[in-house]
Amino acid sequence: MTTSSRQVSFAVDGSTLTGIITEPESHRGLGALLLHPHPLYGGTMDDVVALSIERCLLHLGVATMRFNFRGAVSAPTYRGVAGAIDDALAAESVLKSQTAIERVGIVGYSFGGSVALHVAALKSSEFLCTVSASYDIAAEVGDVAERLASLHCPVLLIHGSADSVVPVEDLDRIRSFIQSGSVATVVVEGAGHFYHRGLHNLEAAVTDFVSRIVMNDNH
């Protein structure tokens, strides 16, 4: 599939963030914001798992934007989960303002998944997909249970069964607060937090989930 990419910059509370918008030749007005792992522990927009997910989305004709949270390039600029939520909200505005994208889904991995839970609720996102999200990190700001209960979009929660960083039980805890009728959970057997095993299973789960959304858009 033919795609075009360009770098973008935007300001959040005095910090300049950079990102990359990639658009398939035909994206049907549907895009996805990709949120990476914890910026203080090496997470950046070039994370291997995030890039794998991006390829799946682009193959389905979904435009993407990935960007670096504050703290990814310069640790002192990190502003916690609340700051990361602000970063993501600003990035979504950039994606919509600089493209013909009308509807945006949120995809987050690890720390990014915890942030995505908030962003999807605050922005009434088209869809939400989290990979190895931590409930405790999500609970660092706001009433996460209330926000999860307010979700109405299709949701996919993915976790590795052998995750030693974020216990797989977090998936069930997050799921218990979501009242949306369209929630799917996938436990990737044998996969740890970094998906050295099971990455293909993760990609298949994301592809199946998002393809259903794309198909619904076509009807």
Image: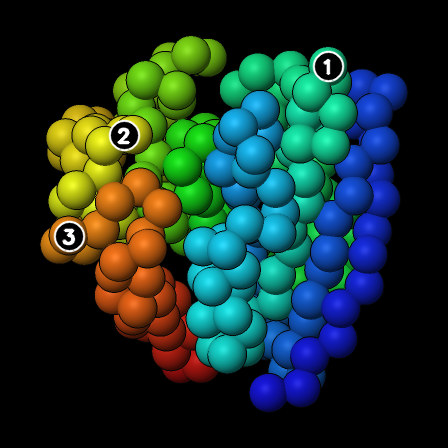
Which residue, given by chain and number where applicable, does mark 3 sit on? 190
Query: Which comes before the other along the chain, label 2 or label 1?
Result: 1
Q: What residue lies at 74% left-to-right and 18% top-to-bottom? A: 77
Q: Position of residue 91 (x, y in %)?
A: 69, 42
Q: Amino acid at mark 2?
A: Val
Residue sitting at the far bottom: 1
Estimate the spatial distance between the alpha carbons at disc 3 and disc 2, rounded to whole Å. 14 Å
Q: Position of residue 169 (x, y in %)?
A: 14, 30
Image position of 189 (left or right of 79) = left
Q: Nearer the viewer, residue 166 or 137?
A: 166
Q: What residue lies at 53% left-to-right and 19% top-to-bottom? A: 81
Which residue, given by chain and number where applicable, does mark 1 sit on? 76
Q: Residues within 10 Å of mark 2 (few under 14, many from 20)?
A: many
Per the image, label 1 sits on a secondary structure element best described as helix
Query: Which comes before the other along the chain, label 3 or label 2?
Result: 2
Q: What residue lies at 39% left-to-right and 20% top-to-bottom? A: 137
- Judged by depth in the image, the label closer to the viewer, 3 or 2, is 3
Q: What residue lies at 67% left-to-right and 32% top-to-bottom? A: 72
Which residue, given by chain and number where applicable, does mark 2 sit on? 166
Report if residue 67 is visible in the image: yes
Q: Amino acid at mark 1?
A: Pro
